[in-house]
Each structure stands twice: as structure tokens, then as C-alpha cells.
Image (tube, coloured by chain):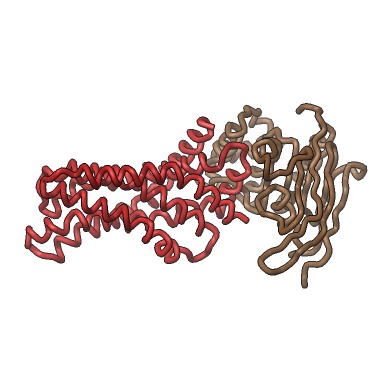
Chain colours: A red, B brown
Amino acid sequence: MISAFLLVLRRELTVAVRRWSDLVMPLMFFIIVCTLFPLAVGQDIEMLNNIGPGAIWVAALLATLLSLNSLFRDDFEDGTLEQLALDKEPLSFMLLAKTIAHWLVTELPLVVLSPVLVLAFGMPVDAIPGLVLTLLAGTPALSLIGSVGAALTAGLRQASGLLALLLLPLTVPVLIFGARAADLAASGQSIAGPLYLLGGISVLALTLAPFATAAAVRVSLD
Amino acid sequence: MDTASYRLEWRELALWRGDRCLQQSLTGRLEAGQALTVRGPNGCGKTTLLRTLCGLSQPETGEILWQGVAVHRNRPDFYAHLAYAGHTNGLKGDLSTRENLRFAAILRGRHTNQNELLHGLRLTACADLPTRNLSAGQKRRAALARVLGSGAQLWVLDEPFTNLDAAGIEWLGKRFNHHLSLGGLLMIAAHQASQVEPDRETILELPGGDT
């Protein structure tokens, strides 16, 4: 089971590296949205400081939604998804490997880049560790919840709008706690409360989402 | 391959696609060393039947038994013995044929000699190219190589001869007969002759289609 997990993870990362141009798009989107805010809002540093944490989180959420569309689409179309479904190893584990690969190649770069964007909003340097922590704790939940939606819509032709509709209500709690924690970090206060809640949501998603994703994939393949 | 005799049975299957009933009351069985060829006009439910027997689609009614146990209760055991190739080839276009086959083999916990298979399917020259660059026939061969190298007892192949040239069809037929002679089970949907020795073959003619 573990070896199947690692095998799928490795294959996903190999494929992702060979299709790196697909990975750049959500990242570019994230950077562009975050850099447009300061341009549009103007030189009011105080206002930028106030909206910064929320804007970075909204951009991260939308970039994630953008990338989720293709999470299972290619595998559905080339038949590798049905091959995974026909394997003796548990489907949920192998799909979890795919979801973790998604997090590693799309969410982790967002987290890594976020310190630069903190500076674009003129937020204090002290706010960087807090913001990075909230993104680290919250983005796994986005990938995992997203994988359920992506699995449900894998077989549909024009599902990007539907996917966003499905996922937005489910990801709003992550956004609320994430933005709140980032806001506290920016104003130099303790972020423990919302950070724990974010971590809790991620752990809950990690335990439940793989099973829902596997069930959704079987429905999509039927 | 061990010689324990495997069998797949299905009883009173009803196949639906959306609100259209394709087939009703399909009952049959497939035993070790036997081949079942599913024939019928386009749209009569050949693919749906194969996918249902593999457990990819759920039948509206009826049950499917592997070794006398319902398939949906014992997926790991059934899938350990099953290799399926559908209309889609199940290959990652960004990986080479070799990489795709290695992934499938390791997932099954096998270390088959790829070179012999690749040679037999005349894929050696393009084995290291990304499969998206292969021709339709070469992709088909690569997908068949996955099934042929799987070591599974039950091969379920949907239109395996599509896009193959005459030599490929003949070679595949030999592999089918070899598989059956070792006590394997084979189920294919095909419009052509299945290349299987007649005394091992049962033909299931599905009625209907354009209703």
C-alpha cells in the first residue's frame, strides 16, 4: 500500500515536471492578482496593510480553484484513472498521493512566494512568518477539499464553473480562518487560535477527503 | 501462473446507460482456459458489459461473481487477477512506453521482462519516446503490452484489434491462445475474428443497438 502510494506520487511529480508550463499558470495568476492590488489601491499604505492578508488569501484560493480543474481531467481522458480504479491497492490511497502531488507542485510554490507579496502590500517583515504559517496550515485543506470536487466533475465536459460553485462554500471556512490569522500576524498579535482551527480543518480533510474522492471517482467512471 | 481454476460468473445482469436499457437478463460464465467474444452492433452495450464485469460500472440488477464471491465485496482479490484495456489506452502521454509499463508492473508487484514484450509488439525503437508522440497503433500496442505483461489471469480487452496491422493481429492471436493454454481467461469485444482457437471460444451475440 505504501509502495503504491509512493509510486503514484513519483509518477505524478514526473508528469508535473514534464508539463511545467501547466504549473506556472496558477502561480502567475497568484502573483498578478497580488501585485495588481497595490497598483489599483494607490499609495495608501495603511489601507494596503489592512487588505493585504485577505487579498493574498483570496488570490491563493482562486489560484487553487484554477489548478484543480485539471487534477483528474487528464487521467480521466487518457484512461489512467480507470486503471487506478481497477488496481488491487486502495483507490483512496493512490488518489491521496495524487492530491499530495498537487499540493507540492501548485500550493507549495504559492507558499514559498508569499513573503515577496507581503512586501508588495507594504506589510511589516515581521508578518511574513505568520502569513507563511497560515498558508502552510490552510492550503492542504484547499487541495484535499478540492480533490473531492475535481473527482466529481472529472467526467463532465465544461465543469470549471460548476467546480467553483461546488467548492467555494466548502473552502470559505479555510479562507475566513486563514485571512483572520494572517491579519493577526500582520498586526503583530498571536495567531494561535485561527491557526489551530486551520490545522484542524486540514487534518479533518486529510482523514475524510481521500475516501470521498475515491467514491466520487468511481461515480465519475460509471 | 498457478493452475487453480478461476471462474467469472454473471447472473441476470441488466445494463442501462442513462434512461436507456441496453441489455437485460444476461447470464453466463467464463472458466479457466476459455475465451468469450462479445459481438453486436454499435451501441448495443458491449463496452458497458465489459466495464460492468470489471466493476467500473454498476449493473442495474444482477450480480457478478469471481470464484463464487461477489466482485464488489472482494475488489482487491478480483483486481489482483484482472487486467483491463478499454477504449482509452491508460497511458500517460508525457511518460515513455517503458516508464508507463514499469509503473504498471511495479504497481502489480511484478518484474516482467519488458524487452521481450516490447520486441514482440515491435515497440523497441520507440520505447523511450513519450507515448503522446506514438501513432494510434503503437499506443494500442503499448496498452496491450501492459495487459500482456500483467501476469493477470483474466484479460478483459475492449476492441483489442483496433488500429493494429495484420502482423500485430496475428501475433496477438498467438498470445491469446498461449494465455488460454496456461489456464487464463479472456474476454474481448471485437468486430473482427478473435483469432482464438474455436474450441476455446464462446461467442456472445448481443442483440439490438439502434432502439
Residue furthest to the right in view is: B199
Asked if residue B66 lies left or right of residue A200, the reply is right
| Residue B147 appearing in the image | no
Rendering quarter of residue A54: bottom left
On screen, residue A204 versus residue B76, left or right, reads: left
Question: How many numbered discs?
Answer: 0
Location of the C terminus of chain A by quadrant is bottom right
**Residue shown at 37%/44% (left/top)?**
A103
Quarter of the image where the N terminus of chain A is located: top right
Residue B121 coordinates in the image, percent (x, y): 69, 39
- Res B124 visible: yes
Q: Nearer the viewer, residue B185 or A150?
A: A150
Q: Going by the picture, which residue comes out furthest to the bottom?
A: B211
The residue located at (31%, 47%) in the rendering is: A138
Location of residue B19 (image quadrant) = bottom right
Where residue A164 sits: x, y (%)? 40, 62
Above/below status of B145 relative to A48? above
Q: Nearer the viewer, residue B181 or A84?
A: A84
Residue A23 falls left or right of residue B144: left
Residue A69 placement (x, y as % from top left): 44, 57
Location of residue A106 in the rendering, given as x and y in whole percent from the top left corner: 35, 47
Q: Nearest the camera: B78 or A66?
A: B78
